[in-house]
Image (cartoon, rainbow, N blue to C red):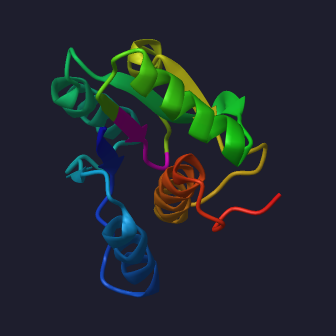
């Protein structure tokens, strides 16, 4: 299984960066991160620019997961099962999309095979990035039968 994280914004050096790299380093699955930054100050123009660049980065052979407040909230076990089911169906590439402060456009959301939410609360997108990396790592450990995850 191969993963891409397409994320709006650049994660600067500091505690969140260190934690993100910690989880990324623990992964046995390859995970590439593409950071997208818009130069536009106007939020509508920035969101449109981000959407164009996100859509350009999507691969035809990948299953797309977009993190969005309108998405489904999954338990960690269900998230791991989703990855396992995709793998069993022959899917070898998953791309995760994490939008910026203004969220994702309808066009980006419509490309997703799964809209995923981290609950009803709003999270800073840099913290959501760390949370996503931890959940991917947790899914890996669940699927390996490792005791990292406890119910």
Residue 122 drawn in magenta: no
Q: Where is the C terminus found, in terms of image quarters?
A: bottom right
Relative image position of residue 79 (x, y in whole percent): 61, 38
* Residue 60 to residue 41: above or below: above
Rendering quarter of residue 24: bottom left
Relative image position of residue 110 (x, y in whole percent): 45, 12
Residue placed furthest toward the right? 151
* Residue 88 to residue 117: above or below: above
Rendering quarter of residue 78: top right
Q: Is residue 81 visible?
A: yes
Residue placed furthest toward the bottom? 14
**Closer to us: 54 or 80:** 80
**Closer to us: 150 or 125:** 150
**Closer to us: 103 or 150:** 150
User: Which residue is at a point 77% across and 63% down the rendered structure image?
Assistant: 150
Q: Is residue 113 left or right of residue 42?
A: right
User: Which residue is at a point 60% across and 52% down the rendered structure image?
Assistant: 142
Residue placed furthest toward the front? 145
Relative image position of residue 9 (x, y in whole percent): 32, 57
* Residue 15 to residue 30: above or below: below
**Closer to us: 31 or 122:** 31
Q: Which residues are magenta?
A: 95-101
Q: Tag count in the figure?
A: 0
Q: Is residue 105 visible?
A: no
User: Which residue is at a point 63% across and 57% down the rendered structure image?
Assistant: 123
Relative image position of residue 145 (x, y in whole percent): 60, 54
Q: Where is the N terminus found, in terms of image quarters?
A: top left
């Amino acid at each position: 299984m191969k993963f891409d994280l397409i994320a709006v914004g650049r994660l600067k050096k500091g505690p969140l960066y260190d934690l993100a790299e910690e989880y990324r380093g623990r992964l046995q699955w390859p995970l590439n991160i593409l950071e997208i930054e818009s130069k536009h100050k106007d939020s509508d123009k920035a969101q449109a620019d981000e959407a164009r660049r996100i859509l350009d980065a999507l691969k035809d052979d990948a299953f797309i997961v977009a993190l969005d407040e309108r998405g489904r909230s999954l338990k960690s076990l269900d998230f791991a099962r989703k990855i396992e089911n995709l793998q069993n169906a022959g899917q070898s590439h998953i791309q995760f999309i994490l939008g910026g402060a203004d969220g994702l456009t309808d066009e980006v959301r419509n490309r997703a095979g799964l809209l995923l939410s981290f609950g009803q609360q709003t999270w800073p997108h840099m913290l959501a990035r760390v949370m996503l990396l931890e959940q991917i790592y947790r899914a890996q450990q669940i699927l390996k039968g490792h005791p990292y995850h406890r119910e």
